[in-house]
Amino acid sequence: MDYGIVVFPQKAVQDIINSYRKRYDPHYSLIPPHITLKEKFELSEENLDEAVAKLDRIAQEVKRFSIKFHKVSHFYPTSNTIYLAIQNSDPLIELHNKIKDAFGKDETPYDFIPHLTIGQKMSEDELHDVYGSLRMRTFELETKIDRFHLMYQLENKSWTVYQSFLLAK
């Protein structure tokens, strides 16, 4: 089965983000706004308990934190993706690195850049148009991060929470 590890911003931030994702993200209906800590990976039923135990240990080691989304950015030309950038991403990078150390290196050729996707799979013209419009806006969205989630993918390609892990106080 395919799994992934994410954090969700608080509901008020999700509502604002969804007003954009509804228009620009074809994955809008598959998963709520999130920050990916570990991309999709395969995990067998036999290894699930061990994975949960590793994630539980990581959650006990990492303290709760807040992050602030402050501007719109993009991954063009690597990907036609527009996202909200995170001003203070160090705690997310620390959490990502602990997960990476526990599960082994990701097979992704890209460096980890914590972000919240608001639009993807756009044409080049649409990307430039939407980015040109959104970069004029200021985003001062702050959210507390007090947990992360092991997600699994259903047959219809949507994602659901398998287990949540509370961070240390």
Image (cartoon, grey):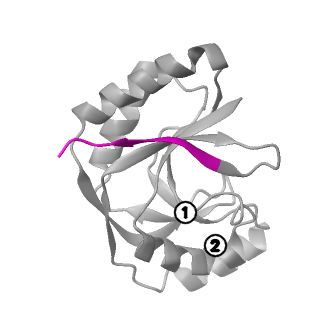
Image height of 83 relative to 48, above or below? below
Q: Which residues are magenta?
A: 160-169
The numbered dot on residue 21 is 2
The numbered dot on residue 153 is none
Please tell me whether residue 125 belongs to the stretch shown in magenta: no
Q: Secondary structure at mark 1?
A: loop
* Sequence-first tag of 2 and 1: 2
Q: Tell me: 110 left or right of 156.
A: left
Image height of 98 relative to 22, above or below? above
Going by the picture, which residue comes out furthest to the left?
A: 169
Q: Tell me: 74 left or right of 80.
A: left
Image height of 148 relative to 33, above or below? above
Which image quadrant for residue 106?
top right
Q: Tell me: 106 left or right of 71.
A: right
Q: Residue 104: in sight, yes or no? A: no
Image height of 107 relative to 79, above or below? above
Q: What's the residue type where badge 2 is placed?
A: Arg
Q: Do the residues under discs 2 and 1 have CB atoms within 8 angstroms? A: yes
Q: Position of residue 137 (x, y in %)?
A: 46, 86
Please tell me whether residue 161 belongs to the stretch shown in magenta: yes
Look at 66% across and 49% down and name the residue there. 159
The numbered dot on residue 33 is 1
Q: Tell me: 100 left or right of 46.
A: left
Q: Position of residue 24 (x, y in %)?
A: 69, 73
Q: Secondary structure at mark 2?
A: helix
Q: Position of residue 166 (x, y in %)?
A: 32, 44
Q: Main secondary structure of the magenta part?
A: strand
Look at 28% across and 43% down and name the residue there. 167
Look at 40% across and 29% down and name the residue there. 55
Cα–Cα span, label 2 and label 1: 8 Å
